[in-house]
Image (cartoon, rainbow, N blue to C red):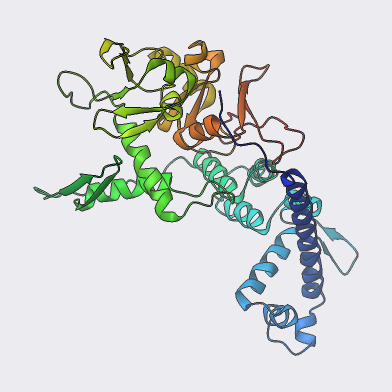
């Protein structure tokens, strides 16, 4: 069950107004590109005494030459050219042109698609650029430019799966250092240094995991890096090769009154003494080895339950095949970085069956539990997410296009 704050009054109307205004801005951008193309075809810049079209555009609308060059480049991709004989030459990216006219693409979408198409190998089949453009425009109509770029990289990898092998690095006896302390609230503060090879691996993981999740991601870079580091730790604790402590794999011990846990109120106490809200315990209970310590009236432990309600290895494989990774719309987190979320909470009687489970990364797992987003299994057996009304008044179900198999 999700616990969330009610939608503020007026938000749905403001959200609709914003979408309408941005759509009009995008349509005007399309019109501007058409005019720029006409200026180019008529060679107006030279007739006006300018050395280049970018210099003319820069002066006309008071923008930097760099931005003017970007507009001219986009115009060259989406404009239709009429020859002196009256023949109309189609745009280089005709589907992008159509979507721009509809007002559904941003200039960054255009760049993302164009850069991907440009990277297609010359030896690829002749219809490859058109197919790539088609797939990316479909993605761009429902996703931000960052997702379009990621989808483009996926398509390029399918076209040309061969890549450069990483350089072989070796360091003898690295002197790694890690210092940390825990404060009263349970937070960890740390400093240190690690050798270059491992630093490169960690840097790569953090860089991939800390990317902004679309234009709505307002987290500062330092917060995104902190969340990414937590993802790395969260993933590492589930690896089968992690050494045991006291004969057992590391797990989370949360101590609290069981009735409070069921009701989602109060706080639990972690093994290190830090407090954890009951709502957080209910969330991590979806896919974590929580060991509930049931307390009696005098706070005397009556029973230490065993790890339970977790998916089986075969179920995890089935979910990986079905969802491909985090199933939340436009999220690129792979399955190995995802939790298993019970659509109907296990504590509320939800079954650990595939039709009640969905893969979500840690960030979107939190969102499902603590916001107005909802998730369900569609009639075709695939997960779909219902946005809040202030995002979509019609609450049309959304799916993750990045993990769809074509």
Question: Residue 236: percent from the left, percent from the top?
Answer: 30, 32
Name the image quarter holding the C terminus: top right
Eyeballing the image, is 168 above or below 347?
below
Question: Residue 290: percent from the left, percent from the top?
Answer: 34, 20
Q: In which quarter of the image is residue 229?
A: top left
Image mark count: 0
Eyeballing the image, is 87 above or below 294?
below
Question: Residue 287: percent from the left, percent from the top?
Answer: 41, 22
Task: Specify whether 44 is left or right of 182.
Answer: right
Task: Specify whether 261 is left or right of 46.
Answer: left
- Work out whether residue 316 can be spotted: no
Q: Residue furthest front?
A: 298
- Work out whether residue 319 can be spotted: yes
Front-lying residue, 195 or 263: 263
Front-lying residue, 11 or 145: 11
Q: Residue furthest left?
A: 173
* Residue at position x 67%, y 39% in the image: 7
Name the image quarter holding the N terminus: top right
């Amino acid at each position: 069950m999700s616990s969330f704050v009610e939608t503020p009054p007026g938000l749905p109307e403001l959200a609709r107004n914003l979408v309408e205004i941005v759509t009009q801005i995008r349509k005007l951008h399309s019109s501007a590109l058409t005019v720029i193309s006409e200026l180019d075809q008529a060679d107006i810049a030279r007739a006006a005494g300018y050395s280049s079209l970018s210099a003319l555009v820069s002066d006309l609308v008071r923008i930097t030459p760099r931005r003017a060059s970007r507009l001219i480049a986009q115009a060259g991709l989406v404009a239709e050219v009429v020859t002196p004989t009256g023949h109309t030459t189609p745009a280089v990216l005709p589907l992008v042109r159509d979507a721009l006219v509809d007002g559904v693409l941003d200039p960054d979408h255009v760049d993302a698609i164009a850069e991907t198409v440009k990277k297609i190998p010359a030896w690829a089949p002749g219809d490859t650029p058109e197919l790539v453009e088609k797939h990316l425009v479909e993605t761009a109509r429902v996703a931000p430019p960052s997702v379009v770029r990621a989808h483009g990289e996926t398509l390029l990898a399918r076209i040309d799966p061969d890549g450069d092998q990483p350089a072989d690095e070796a360091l003898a006896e690295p002197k790694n250092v890690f210092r940390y302390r825990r404060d009263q609230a349970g937070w960890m503060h740390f400093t240190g240094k690690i050798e270059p090879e491992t630093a490169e691996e960690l840097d790569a993981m953090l860089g991939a995991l800390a990317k902004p999740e679309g234009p709505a991601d307002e987290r500062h870079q330092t917060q995104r890096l902190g969340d990414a580091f937590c993802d790395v730790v969260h993933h590492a604790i589930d690896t089968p090769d992690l050494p045991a402590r006291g004969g057992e794999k590391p797990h989370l011990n949360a101590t609290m009154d069981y009735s409070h846990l069921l009701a989602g109120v109060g706080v639990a106490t972690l093994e290190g003494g830090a407090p954890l809200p009951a709502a957080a315990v209910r969330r991590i209970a979806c896919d974590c080895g929580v060991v509930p310590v049931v307390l009696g009236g005098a706070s005397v432990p009556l029973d230490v339950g065993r790890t339970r309600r977790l998916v089986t290895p075969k179920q995890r494989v089935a979910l990986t095949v079905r969802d491909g990774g985090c199933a939340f719309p436009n999220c690129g987190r792979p399955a190995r970085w995802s939790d298993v979320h019970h659509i109907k909470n296990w504590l509320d009687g939800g079954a650990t069956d595939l039709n009640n489970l969905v893969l979500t990364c840690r960030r979107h797992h939190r969102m499902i539990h603590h916001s107005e987003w909802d998730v369900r299994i569609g009639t075709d057996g695939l997960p779909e997410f219902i946005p809040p009304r202030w995002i979509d008044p019609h609450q049309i179900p959304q799916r993750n296009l990045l993990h769809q198999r074509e």
